[in-house]
Each structure stands twice: as structure tokens, then as C-alpha cells.
Image (tube, helix red, strand yellow):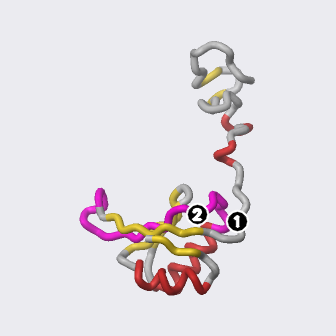
Amino acid sequence: MTRPDPVRLVYSTGVGRVCATCGWPSDQCKCSSKEEEKIPSKVVVKLRLESKGRGGKTVTVLDGLPRNSDFLEGLAKELKKALGTGGSVADATIELQGEWRERLRVLLPSKGFLVKG
């Protein structure tokens, strides 16, 4: 259901909400963003520290992970338990409360990940 004209359909009374990217109804969206990525044999994790927009609180962000919700949820749960901290999964990143870069540089290679940052 690709629209040839430049007008983007946002809502239709016939089908309800429509995906802005592919033009299909939201519940039948065909976008690649909804598909789960396969986990590569070598995952390169990029560590960074953020505090902007968080009221001065420091957050360690693990970036460069595959977009696989089961993998991300499992890894986040494992890391939160090992570090004794809170955190969340957002898009393709894991956010851990506090500054944990030094401990993660030791912990992640033991799980088979390459660490940068």
C-alpha cells in the first residue's frame, strides 16, 4: 500500500492509524524497525557516560547492541543483578544507573563481548 503522491497519510477512517514509514496500518506494519536483528558472533559494546537531562544523575549507557528485545532484556537483567543497580532498556541501548564503566570493562569481555569506550 505505497502511496505514489507526496502526501503522507496519517489516519484513515477505514483502517485507523497508519505507519508513516511504510503506509500499512499500524497493527500490520512491515517496517524493518519492528523486526528483530540476529545476534552476531562478536558484539561490540560502546560504553558512554551521560548526565545531561537527568537532573545531574550519572547513567552508564551501553550502545551498539543488536535490536533484539529478548537479548537486550536478558543482558540488562544480568548486568543489573551483577552490579546491584537499576536500569532500563531503551531502543537498542541499555542504561544503568550510576558510573559502571570500569566494572563493565571487566564483566563484559568475560561474557564474550568486545568493549570500546
Percent of width and height locating residue 9: 60, 21
Of the residues under marks 2 and 1, which one precedes in the sequence?
A: 1
Q: Quadrant of residue 85?
A: bottom left
Q: Secondary structure at mark 2?
A: loop
Residue numbers of the magenta segment? 52-71
Q: How many numbered marks have been drawn onto this rendered protein structure? A: 2
Magenta stretch: dominant SS? loop
State the residue at coordinates (39%, 73%): 97
State the residue at coordinates (41%, 83%): 102
Mark 2 residue type:
Leu
On screen, residue 93 versus residue 13, left or right, reads left
Q: Secondary structure at mark 1?
A: loop
Observer-nearest of 107 and 116: 116
The residue wearing badge 2 is 65
Q: Quadrant of the C terminus?
A: bottom left
State the residue at coordinates (53%, 85%): 107
On screen, residue 19 versus residue 80, left or right, reads right
Q: Residue furthest top?
A: 5
Percent of width and height locating residue 80: 50, 79
Residue 26 against residue 37 in the figure, above or below: above
Label drawn at residue 40? 1
Q: Quadrant of the N terminus?
A: top right
Q: Quadrant of residue 4?
A: top right
Residue 41 against residue 35 in the figure, above or below: below
